[in-house]
Image (tube, grey):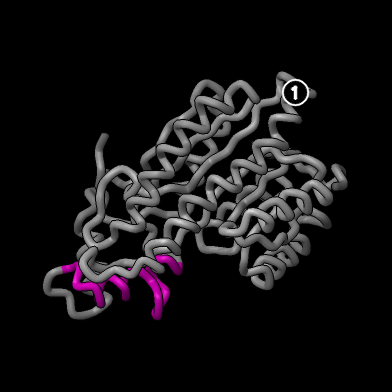
Amino acid sequence: MDKKYTHEGRLSGKVAVIVGGSGGIGRGIVEDFVREGAYVAIADIAIDKAKSIAEEINRRYGKEKAAAVYVDVTDEESVKRMVERILEIFKEIDILIYCVGVVKAGSVKSFSLSDFRFVTDVNYTGYFLCVKHVSRVMAEQHKRNPSRIMDIIQINSKSGLQGSKRNFAYAGSKFGGIGLTQSFALELIEDGIKVNAVCPGNVFDVPLWSDPENGLFVQYLKAGKVPGAETIEDVRRYYESKIPMGRGCTVKDILTAIYYIIEQQYETGQAILVAGGQIMR
């Protein structure tokens, strides 16, 4: 890593790992982090897409600002290799953002065990595996420099704080993620690591919701989750009507919470809600 490419910003010189960095939310985080001076590892199973994003960033912001690294978060050996590769490239890790999430909606009466395991493996177990291997690196960095404070942030969901009808696998995995976050925070603070979660509301304009084949609008329409809905537009209007602020969450809204967590030295184990008033706590 060549520090001469660092520019002034709120993350100047920091190394951030964005797991799921080629997705809609993840890509937004990657691009903003680079603008704020960070070096970014785009870790994703969609490695071709991650490579394309890294190449574009390096053309725009300078050589070696971003690197694509393959990872399958459901495979511990893959997670271990991801961390080893990131250390080869950037030598250190300051921030881990776990921004991976999959959804399978349906009735509990007919939901398949394979779909349930898939959602749990990615959303819950993958988070554990990434924290396990990244926290080891961070703990060693803190041991060498006890003043060094680092951050692990899970991009969770409002569904991690409130149940979701016909979406129990997702909600259950996200509830579990909050439990992991709080438990990791209690242990890892002695290693100079803050662990927090951001719980966005519905981010409608990313593939998770808007993908025409597998997005949540399509899944919820097929699952009959919205009474009387006949089209994807009906489903979207229904969900927009449930938000007091009248719109979906944006990547910018999520980034505001992320920067608060990083810059606030006196907070750990929290679930920061960013849901436009849809849930109030």
Residue beneath label 1, please?
Answer: 143
**Quarter placement of the C terminus:** top left
Spot occupied by residue 158 in the image (x, y as percentages of width and height): 33, 47
Q: Which residues are magenta?
A: 207-226
Point 75% across, 58% down: residue? 67
User: Is residue 8 in view from this perspective?
Assistant: no
Point 75% across, 30% down: residue? 141
Name the quadrant containing residue 187: top right
The amino acid marked with disc number 1 is: Lys
Compared across the picture, whether 186 is left or right of 192 comes to left
> How many labels, in total?
1
Spot occupied by residue 219 in the image (x, y as percentages of width and height): 31, 73
Point 87% across, 46% down: residue? 2
- 96 is higher (above) or lower (below) than 268: below
Element marked by disc 1: helix
Spot occupied by residue 124 in the image (x, y as percentages of width and height): 46, 50
* Between 111 and 267, the one nearer to me in the picture: 111
